[in-house]
């Protein structure tokens, strides 16, 4: 059984404009997959659909054989514990400080975790990513690169098995990119599954992947 089965996915905007047009593919556990295509091809929408963030207009997204949009609350929680998504624009909560942004996923998905352990987990990943500014700041007080660090930290505090990455290195300086590369290599070496979008040729070279090429909302080619 594949980890993900994406079957006959279609997605339309509220004004009935087709973005994804009858797309099907599988993702195997422990593999690295790249969604490739020009801007506007639909790859970011497809990434969010695959992660269960956007509900498709038609078709299904199955995780280990179960449609993610038919899961009960316990199954959904278990799925969210195993996956993490890093958005291109970081998508931090503007009205929450950095500590709160990093604490929210742990509070929701690991309410039983002691507060001290939550704090230690957050501080450890911030240290690894070389985030040295106050955790009391809000996202608006940070540069785009610092916001992306926090977004990466928010994903990794969950210790997920599956990462969805949308231009994860955008706005990061070279030193932080090196740290992110090492973290991702360790994640993959430990059996993690990565599905990513990147226009950074260095990233693509560093993380060779099964390439799903998307053009105008359809799969143009799959390169294994």
Image (tube, helix red, strand yellow):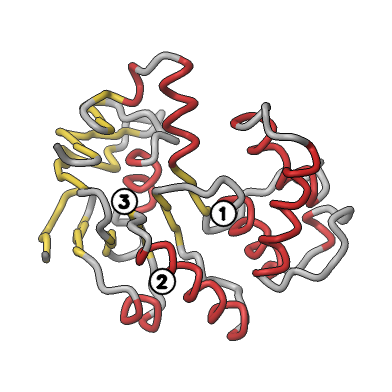
Q: Which residue is mark 3?
A: 42
Q: CA distance from mark 2 to mark 1?
A: 13 Å
Q: Which x, y percent locates residue 123?
A: 76, 58
User: For the point 40% across and 43% down, which residue is it?
Assistant: 48
Q: Which of the image's four quarters has the N terminus?
A: top left
Label 2, secondary structure: give it.
helix
Q: Nearer the viewer, residue 103 or 170?
A: 103
Find numbered disc 1 in the image and state the secondary structure of the residue it sits on: helix
Q: Residue at x 67, y 27 (%)?
A: 112
Nearest the camera: 40 or 127?
Answer: 127
Q: Position of residue 78 (x, y in %)?
A: 45, 28
- The mark closer to the camera, 2 or 3, is 2
How many residues crowd mark 1 within 10 Å: few (<14), some (14–19), many (20+)? many
> Quick one: label 2 or label 1, which is nearer the N terminus?
1
Q: Earlier in the sequence, mark 3 or mark 1?
A: 3
Q: Give residue 156's mark.
A: 1
Closer to the camera, 217 or 112?
Answer: 112
Is the residue 113 above or below the residue 117 in the image? above
**Other-residue count near label 2 (Cα within 10 Å), few / some / many at <14 / 14–19 / ≥20:** some
Indicate left or right for 19 with 88 as reference.
left
Give whichever of 129, 88 is nearer the camera: 129
Extreme-top residue of the structure = 72
Task: Work out how far the residue at label 3 is from the one at label 1, CA to CA, in angstroms.
Answer: 26 Å
Q: Is residue 104 above or below residue 141?
A: above
In this rendering, position of residue 175 left or right of residue 40:
right
Q: Which residue is mark 2?
A: 185
Which residue is at 44% across, 24% downward? 76
């Amino acid at each position: 059984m594949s980890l993900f089965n994406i079957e006959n996915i279609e997605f339309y905007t509220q004004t009935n404009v087709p973005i994804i047009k009858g797309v099907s593919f599988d993702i195997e556990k422990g593999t690295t997959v790249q969604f490739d295509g020009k801007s506007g091809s639909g790859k970011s929408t497809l990434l969010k659909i695959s992660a269960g963030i956007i509900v498709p207009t038609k078709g299904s997204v199955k995780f280990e054989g179960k449609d993610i949009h038919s899961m009960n609350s316990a199954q959904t929680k278990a799925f969210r514990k195993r996956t993490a998504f890093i958005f291109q624009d970081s998508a931090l909560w503007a009205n929450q400080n950095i500590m709160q942004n990093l604490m929210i996923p742990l509070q929701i998905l690991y309410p039983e975790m002691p507060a001290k352990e939550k704090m230690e987990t957050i501080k450890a990943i911030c240290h690894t990513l070389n985030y040295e500014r106050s955790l009391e700041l809000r996202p608006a007080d940070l540069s785009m690169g610092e916001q992306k660090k926090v977004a990466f930290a928010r994903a990794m505090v969950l210790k997920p098995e599956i990462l969805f990455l949308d231009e994860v290195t955008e706005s990061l300086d070279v030193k932080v990119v090196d740290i992110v590369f090492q973290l991702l290599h360790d994640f993959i070496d430990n059996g993690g599954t990565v599905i990513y979008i990147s226009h950074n040729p260095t990233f693509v070279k560093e993380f060779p992947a099964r390439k799903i090429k998307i053009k105008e909302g359809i799969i143009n080619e799959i390169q294994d």
